[in-house]
Image (tube, rainbow, N blue to C red):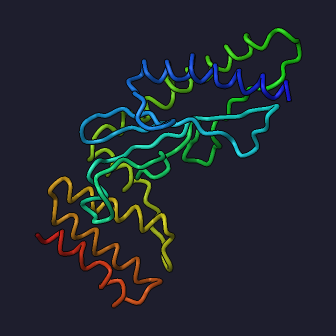
Amino acid sequence: MRAGRAVVDRYLELIEHRVAPTLTAAGFAPFDDDLLVCELGDVTWLVAVELAPWTTDERLSFTLAWGVAVPGLEAVLGEGADELPSTPAGCPIAGRLGERANGVDAAWLTIGPVRVPGLERAADVRTAQTFARLLSGELLPTLRLLDSIPAVQAHLVSNLVRGRGAAANGELKSIRWIAGLSLLLGERDNASRWLDYLEARSSASIAPDVVSERMAPLRQRCAS
């Protein structure tokens, strides 16, 4: 138990004195609990430290979850108030530190026992340096490409998986977000075209009359 407590203490010290200051220097500010945000006007970047499912008291692994939110998107879609998602995973675009579109897993940083007692601090410094390198070399450049509504929309469109047959839930969500972003941009004709596509893809697995009824409020917002 004492060894586990020491690992937890090292983790908390690393987050408070090295990870959080690095994020603050990059423009992020505390928002709610463990969530930090960087507001850019039309979009907001979210980050949060995420523990790995395999974490134990003796060996603790973590990464940084990130997301790009668009204030007003849920409201224009009629799906809630103008509030930020509670976690990065709830954003239209989300990921983890080190992840790649080609399926490369996230970069999980680990705090645990060291081979030579007394070198825990040196090991944690290296972990903090790795985190800072991934943040400045990979994550921040990615986020800087997603600094506006058109950029977020273009990213969603370029990563849209267009399939046949029943649509995956992620596909329908992306199409809905793309249509909502067009509404936020005042591009009602474009929004209407994306709603046509959403209706067609939804009808592949749901009765068309049910789909039409569910989409009626969105159609009305698009026309008003």
- Position of 178 relative to 128 (above/below): below
Instruction: Name the side, left or right, on which 50 lies relative to 223.
Output: right
Q: At 50% across and 50% down in the image, what residue appears?
A: 89
Residue furthest out toward the left? 224
Q: At 45% across and 48% down in the image, what residue appears?
A: 86
Quadrant where the C terminus sits is bottom left
- Position of 14 relative to 166 (above/below): above
Q: At 26% across and 52% down in the image, what residue appears?
A: 72
Question: Residue 41: x, y in percent?
Answer: 24, 37
Quadrant where the N terminus sits is top right
- Position of 39 relative to 221 (above/below): above
Q: At 80% across and 10% down in the image, what residue appears?
A: 119
Q: In the image shown, does 36 or 105 lie closer to the viewer?
A: 36
Instruction: Name the side, left or right, on which 54 lies relative to 96.
Output: right
Instruction: Name the side, left or right, on which 143 lies relative to 168.
Output: left
Question: Residue 56: x, y in percent?
Answer: 79, 38
Instruction: Name the side, left or right, on which 97 lies relative to 92.
Output: right
**Count of marks, rendered view:** 0
Q: Quadrant of residue 214?
A: bottom left
Question: Residue 87: x, y in percent?
Answer: 48, 46
